[in-house]
Image (cartoon, grey):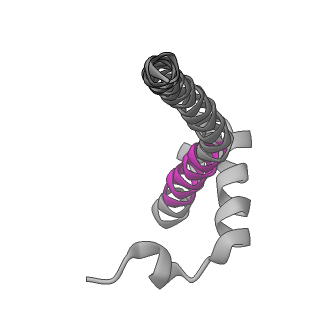
Amino acid sequence: MTPLLSVLELGHEGVRYFANSAIKSDVFQLNQRADEDRYIHAVAFIAHQFYQLQDNLLDTLLTVVPSAQNAAQREHKKWAYAQRQSRDQTLGELVSRLDNDVFSLVGTHTSEL
């Protein structure tokens, strides 16, 4: 089974032409047309609306993706900053403990001399 739009070979401009004609026409005017003409207008109108929906969805996607990327980058920066603070605190505590232990050892050895 061949898709109807392929058989009609309207192309993008042809679909747009018939869809715009259907949009501008009144229901009474469309009913006055021959069946084949009415069907072409109806199919073109539906295809045009479908293409418009796809375009709108793509525009929305292109708008949302950078926003999501920026949010992810902000979250990553916050996470990295928190990790760095935690690491610095742990390292500071380790250095402080080593400092106290080494100085206390040095202090006890110097007092024995």
Please tell me which residue lies in front, 84 or 27. 84
Left or right: residue 38 versus residue 26 is left
- The stretch in magenta equals 42-59
Number of labels in the image equals: 0
x, y percent for residue 47: 52, 58
Please tell me which residue lies in front, 101 or 50. 101
* Residue 51 falls within the magenta-colored stretch: yes
In terms of image quadrants, where is residue 81?
top right
In terms of image quadrants, where is residue 4?
bottom left
* Residue at left offset 56%, top offset 60%: 44
x, y percent for residue 66: 67, 42
* Residue at left offset 71%, top offset 52%: 21
* Residue 52 falls within the magenta-colored stretch: yes
Please tell me which residue lies in front, 52 or 66. 66
x, y percent for residue 38: 52, 56
**Overall secondary structure of the magenta stretch?**
helix
Q: Residue furthest front?
A: 113
x, y percent for residue 37: 55, 63
Which quadrant does the N terminus fall into? bottom left
* Residue at left offset 55%, top offset 29%: 75
Please tell me which residue lies in front, 80 or 113. 113
Q: Residue furthest left?
A: 1
Is residue 11 placed above or below 81 in the rendered structure?
below
Is residue 83 placed above or below 52 in the rendered structure?
above
* Residue at left offset 53%, top offset 64%: 40
